[in-house]
Image: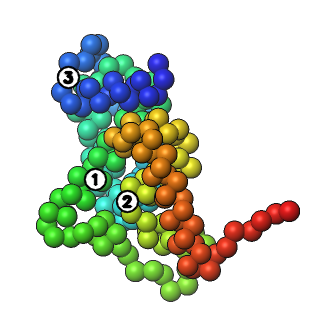
């Protein structure tokens, strides 16, 4: 089964549709091992999209709680990891919508931290990445850090595949514009 097929099956499980095969719950040792292998990548993704370490920790725990609470068919580790990324993305969007209803306009405002006084390249990139919209951050992270293809990203972000292609192109261009504004230019090697 491909990751895309698994994610589609997970969508059915999340929406409350009947799942054909009942999964055996993970025992504590198996879950701890799975958590140790997957949590760092998921936490980094959440932190990059929402921009806040404390908020990322809360959303990370909620994503794993959803995994444990949802009756899923038997899935491989990559399929479970895809489920977690989809759950985390939904949690981020839910938080954004909740705050927006309360009168706040973006996750950037909600989670923004002041820039350090002497930033190094890592913190510069965090700051530049923070200037992007949450969906742009999610697209760039899923594509270039996690290595998902357009079809998989479409399933995780609940978008059409063509929308992912266009949105990813725009996100790359927007990040390039942010970098140019801060004095970074592309080096062309001859």
The 10 Å Cα crowd at callout 3, few under 14, some 14 to 19, many 20 or more, is few
Furthest-bottom residue in view? Answer: 117
Q: Give the structural element (helix, strand or loop) at label 1.
A: helix
Q: Nearer the viewer, residue 99 or 63?
A: 99
Q: Nearer the viewer, residue 32 or 59?
A: 59
The C terminus lies in which quarter of the figure?
bottom right
Residue 176 makes an appearance in the image: yes
Left or right, 24 with reference to 184:
left
Q: Which residue is mark 3?
A: 17
Disc 1 from disc 3: Cα separation: 22 Å
Residue drawn 45% across the image and 41% down it: 162
**CB under 8 Å between callouts 2 and 1?**
yes
- Percent coordinates x, y for residue 11 in the rendering: 29, 30
- Percent coordinates x, y for residue 21 in the rendering: 29, 13
Lower sequence index among marks 1 and 3: 3
Q: Which residue is mark 1?
A: 93
Left or right, 47 with reference to 146:
left
- Percent coordinates x, y for residue 164 in the rendering: 45, 45
Q: Which residue is mark 2?
A: 134
Q: Give the structural element (helix, strand or loop) at label 3.
A: loop
């Amino acid at each position: 089964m491909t990751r895309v097929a698994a994610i589609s099956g997970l969508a059915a499980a999340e929406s409350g549709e009947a799942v054909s095969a009942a999964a055996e719950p993970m025992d504590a040792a198996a879950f701890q091992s799975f958590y140790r292998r997957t949590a760092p990548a998921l936490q980094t993704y959440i932190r990059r999209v929402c921009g806040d370490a404390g908020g990322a920790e809360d959303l990370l725990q909620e994503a794993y709680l959803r995994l444990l609470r949802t009756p899923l068919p038997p899935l491989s580790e990559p399929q479970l990891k895809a489920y977690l990324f989809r759950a985390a993305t939904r949690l981020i969007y839910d938080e954004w919508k909740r705050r927006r209803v309360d009168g706040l306009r973006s996750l950037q405002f909600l989670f923004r931290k002041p820039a350090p006084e002497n930033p190094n390249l890592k913190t510069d990139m965090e700051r530049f990445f923070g200037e992007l919209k949450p969906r742009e951050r999610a697209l760039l992270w899923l594509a270039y850090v996690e290595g998902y293809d357009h079809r998989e990203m479409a399933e995780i972000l609940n978008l059409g595949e063509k929308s992912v292609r266009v949105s990813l192109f725009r996100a790359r261009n927007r990040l390039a514009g942010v970098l140019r504004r801060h004095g970074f230019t592309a080096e062309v090697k001859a």
